[in-house]
Each structure stands twice: as structure tokens, then as C-alpha cells.
Amino acid sequence: MNVLEAYQIPILSLEDKVYPYSFTGNDEFFAAFEQEWVQKGEFNAKATLDKSATMTQVRLIIDGHLKLICDRSNEEFEFPIHIDEKIIYKYSDHNEDMGDNLFLFDRKSPKLDLSQDLFDFIALQVPMKKLHPRFVKPLEEHVDGELIYTTDPEDENKADQEPEMDPRWAALKKLTDNN
């Protein structure tokens, strides 16, 4: 059996009402996508499917953790995730991604596959810079008055003023201004 089949909902036979589903995933789930972005982790997902005559709305709540490799120390660490997203599948005669979690969904499709959506939401949680928690300062540890980034106030004033012009160009500019 394909690992991703567990994330398919037989939607064609459902009546128009609300259905709760729950899914779990681990390293096998991430390995099924054959990518290097997320390789290890565990999650529990609760899906609330609200089926109507024209569309299906799915609310996904995903809790778990990913096992990432620190960019600084090459140590593995657990990165917690919590996701709360809503997806709308509007019935149509073909499948299409309309953006912003809105999809056209072929009304003749027997199953709604949530595996790719689950993976995408989880993969978007991976930070660009993966740092072990011991390298990250909690917000309450920042000292008042501590500057993260600053510019010299004199540089800002200089940016507002016009730069001095070379005297040779100034003489040529006077010629063009007189015409």
C-alpha cells in the first residue's frame, strides 16, 4: 500500500455536511515525496471537511515537530510546528490551483487527496536559517536599548542632501541652464 493513500478522503459518496478526520505522519510520509527539504518529523493533523453542493471547505490543524539539521553546528534538533489553515475546493470540470488556498476540483473525482496540501503547509514552516534552539535568544532576553541594526544619523542626513558636484560639471551645467 502506498503511504499517501491514508490521506485520501472518498468525497464522492459523502453527503452535504461536516465531517471530522484525523491523520498522523512520520518519516515515511516525508520520504514519499522524494525531496530534501523535510526528511524527518512527526505530526498529527485534524481535518474538518465541510461539504456543500458547490464546494468543500477543509480546515487543517497540524501539530507536531520536524527534525532539522542546524546550519551552525550540524546537530539535529526538533523544530515545533503548529499550523491552522483553511482550503477551499470549488467544484468544476477540471482541477486547477487558483492560489491563496483556493482550488478548482473536478466534481467527478472520487477522492480528495490531502497529502500534498499537508506536506506543503508543513514544508512552509521550515525556517530559511535553521538554528538549534540554544543559538536563538528568546524575546524576553533582549536587553532594552539593545540595537539589532542601526545606521549612522549623519549618513541619513547626507542621503537627504544633494551630493556636491564636481566644479567642472557645475560649469557645464551653467551652460545648459542658460539655454
Image: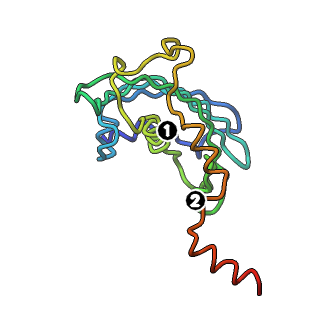
Residue type at the position of mark 2: Glu
Spot occupied by residue 73 in the image (x, y as percentages of width and height): 24, 27
Element type where label 1 sits in the image: helix
Q: What is the secondary structure assignment of the residue under circle 2? A: strand
**Mark 1–mark 2 distance (CA, rounded to whole Å):** 18 Å
**Which residue does the image show at 63% across and 73% down from the upper left?**
170
Pick the residue in front: 45 or 140. Answer: 140
Q: Which residue is mark 2?
A: 96
**Residue 15 at least partly seen:** yes
Residue 27 shows up from this direction? no
Residue at 33% of width from left, 45% of height from top?
33
At x 62%, y 48%, the residue is 100
Q: Position of residue 24 (x, y in %)?
A: 41, 27
- Which residue was labeled with disc 1? 121
In the image, 156 versus 165, the foreground residue is: 165
> What residue occupies the far left of the structure in this picture?
74
Measured as percent of width and height from the top left, residue 133 is found at: 36, 19
Sequence-wise first label, 1 or 2: 2
Query: Is 41 above or below relative to 165?
Result: above
Q: Amino acid at mark 1?
A: Phe
Depth-wise, is mark 1 or mark 2 nearer the camera? 1
For the point 35% across and 28% down, the residue is 131
